[in-house]
Amino acid sequence: MAETTGEIRKRNIAYKLRIGDVLKGVPMMDEGKFLFLELGDRKVVRVNILANCVDKFIQEGEKQFGSLTVDDASGQLKLKVFGEDIDRVKNIMQGDTLQIIGNMREWNGEIYMIPEVVKKVDARWLLVRKLEIQNARKDLPVDEKGDNSLKNQVLDKIKGAEADGGIDRETLVMDVEASPEAIESEVKKLLEDGLIYEPRPGRLRYLG
């Protein structure tokens, strides 16, 4: 059945974005009421993000309130739920990887989200989403140059993981804010230079 014009108007596009991009949006207001985030030529109201839960707060009682802080390595965003809607986040635990769809809001200079859907997913989807967004937005500035600053970021991440016996390539790609291709290029150079090594496929360690 065809949707009516009214139904189409009610539902805003849920843009697939990384949190870092959401936080770059400029809140557009009308007499104190939030309208949308201006992000380039897009007017963003709803977003679809994948992120890890790093903090959770639930307040029961007369004034029910819940909040989650989520992180996708590009930034952190707070989700807020009120009243019976706290059921959407009650079963979420720190460390869970989540797919979240919701409406953006702004209050006292803070950009946050009112979630409609909060669903646990496999952590590997974070990498899939990063690749998906990078491929869809070739026009956005990405550090592709393989300069010293990116090299140092990659090397610092590998060094910092020595206490854990190294770092997986997938984790490195998620944690460094650059395109996967640029990161892999730097890893290849570091391997060739003998600064790092790969004790087993996909695992990287610092040689020192």
Image (spheres, rainbow, N blue to C red):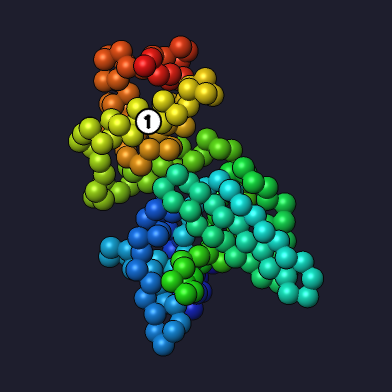
State which quarter of the image contains the N terminus: bottom right
Q: Where is residue 47 in the image (x, y as percent from the top left)?
A: 47, 60
Q: What element carries label 1?
A: helix
User: Is residue 14 visible to us here?
Assistant: yes
In the displayed structure image, the side of residue 55 where residue 144 appears, left or right: left
Residue 81: quarter of image: bottom right
What is the total number of numbered labels drawn onto the structure image?
A: 1
Reply above or below: 137 against 111: above
Front residue of 99/12: it is 99
Give x and y (percent) for residue 141: 24, 48
Q: Say which residue label 1 marks.
A: 156
Taking 59 as reference, is 135 above or below it? Answer: above
Query: For the C terminus, which image quadrant?
Result: top left
> Residue at the spot x=50%, y=65% of the render?
112
Q: Residue furthest right?
A: 61
Amino acid type, residue under disc 1 in the picture: Asp
Residue at 62% across, 61% down: 67
* Relative side of 61 to 94, left or right: right
x then y, percent, for residue 97: 58, 44
User: How far across and down, in percent of the image, does residue 131 sit?
Assistant: 39, 39
- 195, 2: nearer the viewer: 195
Residue at image position (39%, 84%) is 30
